Structures are given as structure tokens and as C-alpha cells.
Amino acid sequence: MSQQAQPAVDRPPASGPKRTDGRTARRPLPLRLLARPEVGVFLGALAVLVFFLITAPPVRDGSSMANILYQSSTIGIMALPVALLMIGGEFDLSSGVAVISSALTASMISYQLTLNVWTGVIVALVASLAIGAFNGWMVVKTGLPSFLVTLGTFLILQGANLAVTKLVTSNVATDDISDMDGFGQAKKIFASSFDVGGVQVKITVVWWLVFAALATWVLLRTKYGNWIFAVGGNKDSARAVGVPVTFTKISLFMLVGFGAWFVGMHNLFAFNTVQSGEGVGQELIYIAAAVIGGCLLTGGYGSAIGPVFGAFMFGMVQQGIVYAGWNPDWFKAFLGVMLLGAVLINLWVSRAATRR
């Protein structure tokens, strides 16, 4: 007697924890936060602030904090375009002396030709943008590393600043332009102060935050921001998908030129005169603020908010050492420690963020 085969019945899967592919598993919140380039520097800036609030009581005063923010803003305004350029995969070693070149141009054009100072301001803007465009064009067209191209520009500007100033003014500094037409109007824009609760705050602090918000919007919400990340990650791949690599890189160098112009105008209208030998070494501070802010040296990664905190750390340390009564020569030592620490933290964060 034959038996009839029973139809197969699909059993429901056994209950238990759901298994997920490591590639699609959602990372824990702490790791996702660490993946943000600005989180590490924010915690570092907070730690530095607390440290100096404890060790340097004058820091707790409102006027002292306003001075710290002012020092941070003069670094931060330039650190922003430098950071964007680094995200785009390039460096600019001429940014420090370019600030002085811009101020010298505006001052000498206005004073020596007895023109309204706004004429000098506009000429300086054109010159600064031209220097940035030259750097970008040389990097793109020759294929040379931006380190070498901008090092050459750095030396050219450094020598020209001193030589031209001595030739035109017979001195190492420009003449005082405070009594010239248009000076008062320009000072209100570039170097004025306003009162907040009895504390004088420099206008550069406001400009710094405005530029940071604008740069953040550009990076996160615009096509141009996508281009910056793309060319910094892999320019050949970016070009293959239609990204205008040449335009993006040259425009980034021109943004650095714009930043140099703005800070140069602040220096000119804050002090009425410019020392032609200044600016050397500032480019390292701008780059360090960007690196501490989470921008990788290899490009393709970073933010605009991170360099804000990086610049604040610099201003905090620079002024905090003075308020604490320590030898200000230690500032460069702190600078080196912060830079090495930031590089190590960035390395650890990038590994932790990608660890499965």
C-alpha cells in the first residue's frame, strides 16, 4: 500500500535577534558624532576655555573675552578660505604675506596718489584676487604641487613688500592715512567697534561669524560645495563626472585672496599704517587652525565650523597666556602641541568613524 507524500510546509523563521550586514548596520551615535570633523575641535576648544577660566581669572571679564574673540576673528577670517582650499586638496603658503601685500597696496595707492582711500581699497581687492588667480592657474596648468607654487609666491611677495615700500616711502612702513578722504567710512566697515553690555566688541567678530555661516551654507547646500569635496577627494574622478575642476581650484585660491584682502583692510584701518615686514609665519597659523578644525591634509574632508573653533583655540591660548601672567614666548610651543594633538585626534577619529 503506497503512502501519499505530504506537501512541504514552510516553517516561520525562528525568533531571535535580527542579523544585519556590517555594511548596512547603523553606527552608534557616539561614532556618528565623532565622524563630524568639528566635534573633536569643539571639545578641545571647550577644554582650553575651561582651563584658562580656572588658571587666568582675568579671562572671566567681559572685556577680556571680547579681546580673545577679536584675536580669534583675525585668524578665523583667513582660516575659513584656507580651510575650503584644503578641503579642495590644495595649500596656500602665501596667505600670510598676501594680507600685508593687500594693505600696502591700498595704503600706497591712496597716499602716494592722493586719492580717496576707497580707490586704494578697490585696487587692493583686484590685486589680491589676481594673486589668488595666478596661484590657482599655475597649480592647474602646470600640475606642480601647490606647496611649491605658493612657496614661490610667498617669497616674491615677501621681497616685493619690503623693496617696494622702501622705494616708494623711503621707509619700512607706509604713511598714516587717517586724515584722508573716505577713511572714516572704510574704518566703520573693516575696523570699527560696537557696545554690547558695556563691552566694546570689534566688528571683525561679526564678519567672522557671518563668513563662517556663509561658508557652511556653501559647503552643505550648494553645488559648488559638492565640487569642492569632489576635487579634494579625487580630481580625476570629479572631472570624469563633469565637475569643473579648473574653475573650482582657481576660484578657491581667489577666495583665499579675498580673505587676505579683507584682513589686510582691517589691519590698515585699525592701525592707520602697515609694517612691510609683517605677515611671515601667519600662513602656518591659518593652516594649523584649519587642520585643528578637522580638515585633512589629504583633502576631501572638513567643514567650515571646525576652523572657527580652531581659530578660537588660538585666540584663547594667545591671550590666555598673557592674562595668566606667563611668558608669551610659550605661545608657539602651545601652537605646536595643539597642531600635533589635532593631527593625532583626526587620525583616531577617522579610524573610529570607519571601524565596523
Image (cartoon, rainbow, N blue to C red):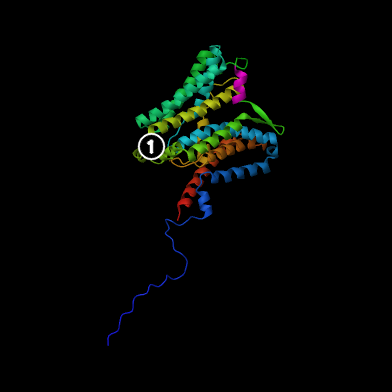
Q: Is 89 placed above or below 261 here? A: below
From the viewer's perspective, tell me whether residue 134 is left or right of residue 178: left
**Residue 173 placement (x, y as % from top left):** 56, 18
Q: Is residue 185 magenta?
A: yes
Q: Do we see residue 196 in this rendering? A: yes
Quadrant in which the C terminus appears: bottom left
Our reading of the magenta stretch's main secondary structure is helix
> On the image, which quarter does residue 136 sit in?
top left
Q: Secondary structure at mark 1?
A: loop
**Residue 272 placement (x, y as % from top left):** 60, 20
- Between 266 and 276, the one nearer to me in the picture: 266
Q: Do we see residue 270 in this rendering? A: no
Q: Which residue type does callout 1 highlight?
A: Val
What crowding class fits label 1: few (fewer than 14 Cα within 10 Å), some (14-19), or many (20 or more)? many
- Magenta residue span: 182-190
Residue drawn at x 50%, y 31% as measured from the top left: 283
- Between 209 and 155, the one nearer to me in the picture: 209
> On the image, which quarter does residue 148 sit in?
top left
From the viewer's perspective, tell me whether residue 208 is left or right of residue 164: right
Residue drawn at x 53%, y 41% as measured from the top left: 306
Q: Is residue 78 magenta?
A: no
How many labels sit on residues? 1
**Residue 164 placement (x, y as % from top left):** 49, 17
Q: Is 12 placed above or below 127 here? A: below
The residue that mark 1 highlights is: 243
Name the outermost residue toward the left. 1
- Between 228 and 57, the one nearer to me in the picture: 228
Quadrant in which the N terminus appears: bottom left
- Between 219 and 354, the one nearer to me in the picture: 219
